[in-house]
Amino acid sequence: MENYVDIFKVLANQTRIDMLMWLKNPMDHFEKPTAHLSKNISEKGGVCVGDIQEKANMSQSTVSHYLSMMQKVGLLESERHGKWTYYRRNEEIIQQVATFIQKEL
Amino acid sequence: MENYVDIFKVLANQTRIDMLMWLKNPMDHFEKPTAHLSKNISEKGGVCVGDIQEKANMSQSTVSHYLSMMQKVGLLESERHGKWTYYRRNEEIIQQVATFIQKEL
DNA sequence: TATATTAATCGATGATCTTCGATATGTCAA
DNA sequence: TTGACATATCGAAGATCATCGATTAATATA
């Protein structure tokens, strides 16, 4: 895992915070989040870049970049299926950040 | 209170994180944190800018600026006594940030 | 009141972040 | 194998951040 400063850098942006919250309950924020996925794959969930981009209303390159930096610090995990890359939250790391602030910071 | 993004911006810097941790247990990190303070004042604690600067080993202006931005977003509170300004943690806000991440983010 | 001390503010410069469009890469389907 | 589509990467511009030294403001004291 990464340094907490790097995680805070990633969180220091409203769009990226929004993305994290959208992914908390994909059904509430995306039309058909797993439309391209076969059932067994879609169990772990995740939303593809295109859907997130549409919601974020930013350029494809920016959204891809944001998602990749969120993954780099551990807040998200990704899985590629065919043409699509699905991103989902890494709940463990997110809780670890909360615990760090609560106990150590 | 401020937006959480602004709090994360403040936390996106190792020196500022260090400062927050030093202030968690001033006795462990500073010589005589309350040397200039009369007893009744020093009960609430706090460390003056000069002591924090010495520990941080950065310029006076940078340290003062950092402390003031930490205060602006609510992570610290300050109190001036004579020539000195004492900074201490705002535990409530800090816990609020932890809770935000744990429950809402 | 003049001076020393502590902290805050100002102005500048280099570094990093934000964001885009263009291009490259990977993958499916005709 | 050639397009079409989804995503990733590249390179650039403008904005914001990090950090400093110099100056100003506030306070105590000689």
Image (tube, coloured by chain):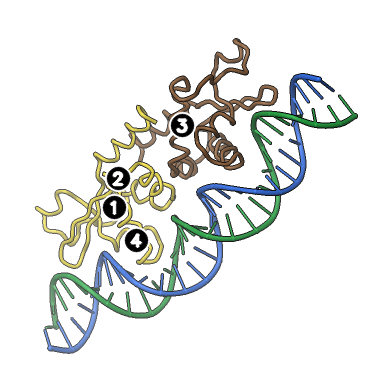
Chain colours: A brown, B yellow, C blue, D green
Residue B80 % position (x, y):
18, 60
Residue B105 % position (x, y):
39, 31
Q: To which residue does mark 3 refer?
A: A20
SS at circle 4: helix
Q: Same chain for marks 4 and 2?
A: yes
Q: To which residue does mark 2 refer?
A: B2
Q: Chain of mark 1?
A: B
* Circle nearer the viewer, 2 or 1: 2
Q: Chain of mark 3?
A: A
What residue type is disc 1 on? Answer: Lys
What residue type is disc 4 on? Answer: His
- Residue B85 is drawn in which quadrant? bottom left
Q: Same chain for marks 3 and 2?
A: no
**Which is nearer the N-term, disc 4 or disc 2?**
2
In the picture, the disc for residue B65 is 4
Do residues under tags 3 and 1 come within 8 Å of each other at their CB atoms?
Answer: no
Residue A24 lies left or right of residue A64; in this view the side is left
